[in-house]
Amino acid sequence: MTIRALFIGFVGAMFIAGFGYINDRILELENFTSGHLLPVIVLGLAFLLLLLLNPVLHRIRQSWAFSPAEIGLIVILTSLSCSIPGRGLMEQFTQCVVMPYHWNRVDPGWRERKLLDYVPKQAFVTVDEETYDHVVTGYMQGAGKTSSAEQTFGQSMRNKVNRVPWGAWKTPMLVWLPMVFLVAGCSICLSLIVHKQWSKHEILSYPIAEFTASLVEREEGRALPLVFRNRAFWIGFLIIYLIRVNNGLCVWFPDYLIPVRLGWDMRPFGTMFPSIFRVQWGGELLRFNLFPLVVAFAFFLSTEVSLTLSLTQVAYVIFAIPLVTRGVNMSTDYALGGWNGYMRAGSYLAFTIMLLYTGRNYYRDLLVKAVAVWRRFSPEEGENVWPTRFLMVGLALLTFLLMRLGLEWPFAVGFVGLMMVTLLVVSRVSAETGLFFIQPRWQPIGIMMASVGVFTMNPTTIMIVCLACVILCIDQSQAVMPYMVNGLKIADKLKLKTTRVAGISMFVYVAGVLLAVFAVLVATYDFGAPLYNWSHQRVPSMPFQAVNNAVLQLSARGELADAEGLRWFARLGRALPMEYFVPAASIGFILVIVFSFLRLRLPKWPLHPVMFLLWATYPMAFTCHSFLLGWMIKKAAVRFGGTSIIRKIRPFMIGIIAGEIMGAMTFMLVGVIYFMVQNGIKPKRYQYFPR
């Protein structure tokens, strides 16, 4: 762990955190977060460093070349920063605390039911009639520009900074940023805790970390990584890279080139099975999308996991068709839930129980040591004991901050627990399957409302919990913990001290968030808020839609005053689960428990319970065919060639992954250059990563 690696990793992380949102949403160039847990901007630049810069440094002086550990640290820190500019935080953070004022003026129903009155005053920017235009309209449209050609760059930047009404933003930042940092800290501590169990005891495959480590590994005295000297790697790389470059050029010059087809739409044949289209994502089974990246990653998985992922959507369609044809409503709202969301939530809870059961001895011993503060322990034991203590303190502080915002303690505890369950399971899925794009498609607010009803939750509680959801955990796959879990495995493989890496990562994250908030507010008050529906309207409106539905229901029953006036324990006696919640959640829970039991007891059981965590989600609907192809290739290789052919094919698959990443990186760079040369004209977009 050298000074230059720390410096480059820190600078790279600050660039991604500070400029990422501006690049993605204001300039609308290729997303920095493209690839999600396999970030193109990070691994693409690492590939160029390994291929172009490192050999030059090695030729000048061997000691100047970056070691695998140095490159690994840079990748870890910059990858972690990818959780900041996208849906992990900044894509919706500032919009959620200011845009509701605008939508309140637009929607008469909000004003009629006084929905803004249910928001804690300190949760949103400070606004009155006099400052509305400056704070809200200025945010949406961009404040008036006063720069001239005679101004220096420093004067221009000073004017941009001064346009931001910092006083109006101070209060919500003091409310939400401590919670953001606590969630990140708890995620990093939990990552350290589970790392030993998952990597040493259960020996998970960690495909993303395995790929990264394979890419940087090199022998002493050699300029290039070991895999770069393998012919199979370059064959796989060139095949995919040339296909992607050709298809990208077809977007720019459609009259001169012919694209290589990687998708086949067979949905017209669905007329033979019309019921398949009544199921969510059912029609996608007849649309074959080939993602070479997914095929290659499937090769790194056990055949059990890759087969499960390939059959996930098929199993869901077979399960759902009889229910849908009998009139069961299986539609699911992203935040508020529905049948599929309730079922996946039950699966997540059951899977968490199985994770705790599998590592029960390790976690029990760790908890005892963490609580027994008077006991002494070895430095090796302290690597996990102190993170456990920090985790407990962090969760308690997060619960306290939610209570100070106005949330009653049972609901604060429930929200924090459910949020950590989603982060834990998403991280586990990534570590075990290599999925870089995961959607739980359920939120704590939906499960809490469905389990006790709107009277017990009451509108104020619903508002606070939903605000916490949209700011802290709206997209768990881009949160800190999945990046950190993979990062710790990379550190472990490259002989870096995991606790030190975790501490540095926390510092980098805090600095990155502070820089990102500053940069986003300055840029938004200069250019105006991007009109991207997800962050501009959909997410900021989620809490108000939930409260609006609750107010209408309670008003119709004449219970609104009681719901707002009674204490939580009085309301709890009138808890009423929503329709379908108990059967849907129970089915998901039981399926995971049964499949987990069969997997533990029957050595040849072919399916993994991860199936029920992922089915009926967008990522699996589009990648299941590629997982099936990857499973078939690995199964055939094991059957006819054994371990020797597996070792020979492995560099070829690494080359395919690298080719996919560099194809995306190429057009990311082309887009930036075109934007700069053409004075701000936006380039044509060529995107092929599942998103």
Image (spheres, helix red, strand yellow):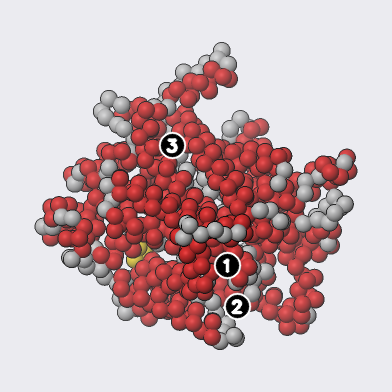
List the residue tagged with mark 3.
529
* Residue 360 placement (x, y as % from top left): 50, 72
Q: Residue furthest left?
A: 558
Q: Quadrant of the C terminus?
A: bottom right
Residue neighbourhood size for the residue with mark 2, other residues' Cα within 10 Å, grouped as few (<14), some (14–19), many (≥20): some
Indicate the amino acid at tag 3. Ala
List the residue tagged with mark 1.
197
Q: Earlier in the sequence, mark 1 or mark 3?
A: 1
* Image: 274 above or below 98: below
Q: Residue at x 67, y 42 (%)?
A: 6
Indicate the amino acid at tag 2. Glu
Q: CA distance from mark 3 to mark 2?
A: 46 Å
Q: Residue at x 40, y 67 (%)?
A: 345
- Discs 2/1, front: 1
List the residue tagged with mark 2.
304
Would you say residue 479 is visible in this rendering?
no
Residue neighbourhood size for the residue with mark 3, other residues' Cα within 10 Å, grouped as few (<14), some (14–19), many (≥20): many
Observer-nearest of 506 and 445: 506
Q: Earlier in the sequence, mark 2 or mark 1?
A: 1
* Residue 212 placement (x, y as % from top left): 69, 57
